[in-house]
Amino acid sequence: MSLVIVLAAAVAVCVLAAAGYLGRRAVARSARVLAGGVQRMLFGVATLAGRVWRLAAAAWLGAKARLGRLGRFGGLGGLGRLGGLGRLGRGRTGRRLPVRPSDIQSSARPLRNTPRALLNAIRRDIAAGQEDNKFIALATSGDVLPRRLLVEFAGQQARVMASNQRSLLYLAARFTDTAAGRFFAELAETSRHAADMLGLFVEAAGARRAELRSSEPLAGCQAYPAYVSWLSLNASAEDAALALAASLGTWGDNFAAMGQGLRENPAFRISGAGERATAFFDIFGVPGTHLENLALSVVREAQEAGRKPVHALGYARLLTAYQAMFWNALAERAEAPG
């Protein structure tokens, strides 16, 4: 009997010990599960906080950039240089503000980024710095035909057109089968046609075509085609097209004025050739919408590909400056003794 009691007690002890061991494992397992859940929750909170921080930083940088752009116009108070909403685009003096590179390259208003708006903005900028052309007055006024001046002009212009034609053909080859290729190729053809008409003008001025090749190249006159050559090697299609299209307007205005002055001067007697003698000036002087539309197509094609004409304004300013050098160099030669 005692042995049975002892065995029963041993069994009971074993059962209780086993129950206690299993209970501790269950508690430990529950604790591990709880700790894992807490860890995952903390990780999620940290991730969410990081995302909120990045969104806040992005919003702050965007607001800072917008305030910076607005600050360039003189600050928030009264919109600074804009002079208030009642005179948008004009300063306190009422004068129109000059176009700046930032206005060409970026703007909060989408319309300012259209090809037409970019071209017009560049034209306004370069037109603001135009000066009177002394050479045209010297070459087209007076009772005696200034044959020497006209031949000098023709000789320098022949070199300019020959160089520009090669540069434009190279640009066309760089951008074959694109709107840019067509634009540069047509500009090159315009230069070729103008070179043919230049010969008629020289003959009407009483000179021979062979005299064009004997004229000494002037540095001031040849800086313009040298820069066009630089553009042909380094400029993007959209920058070159936009700059050339814009600067051709000022170049053409001078040619139109010279052609008109010669036609109105009685000393300029045209024999045999008729109005064709001054047709050379009309090639550049008469605005052509076809070439302009081609240039706009170049810019539009670039924008659709994600590119912007970031250097066009600077290129156009330099082209215009070198064009002015052409006329000033001729004026200096005309005023030189002998």
Image (spheres, rainbow, N blue to C red):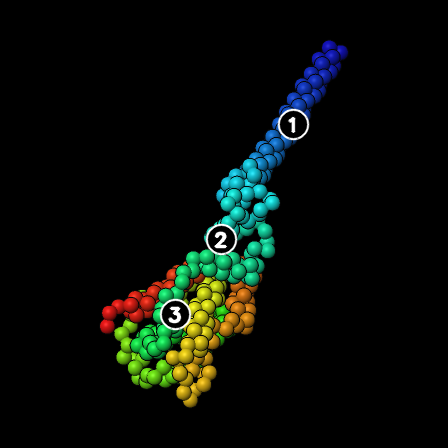
- The kind of residue on which mark 3 rests is Ile
Residue 157, above or below 131: below
The outermost residue toward the bottom is 272
Q: In whole angstroms, how far apart are the C-alphas of marks 3 and 1? A: 93 Å
Q: Residue at x 49, y 60 (%)?
A: 123
Vertical side of 46 occupied by 196: above or below: below
* Label whose residue precedes the other's in the sequence (1 or 2): 1
Residue in the foreground of this view, choosing between 31 and 139:
139
CB under 8 Å between discs 2 and 3: no
Eye-nearest disc, 1 or 2: 2
The residue under label 2 is 99
Please tell me which residue is depicted at 45% across the width and 74% down the height of the picture: 260
Tell me if mark 1 has few (under 14), some (14-19) or many (20+) residues whose alpha carbon lies within 10 angstroms of its own. Answer: few
Considering the image in quadrants, where does the N terminus appear? top right
Secondary element type, mark 1: helix
Q: Is residue 257 left or right of residue 149?
A: right
Looking at the picture, which amino acid does disc 1 mark?
Leu
- In percent of width and height, residue 9 lies at 71, 14
Work out which quarter of the rendered image holds the C terminus and state it: bottom left
Please tell me the numbered disc located at residue 168: none
Mark number for residue 136?
A: 3
Foreground of the two, 36 or 278? 278
Q: Position of residue 8 (x, y in %)?
A: 73, 16
Residue 29 in sight in this render:
no
- Element under disc 2: loop
Q: Quick one: 197 or 103, which is closer to the camera?
A: 197
Q: Are marks 1 and 2 in contact (CB under 8 Å)?
A: no
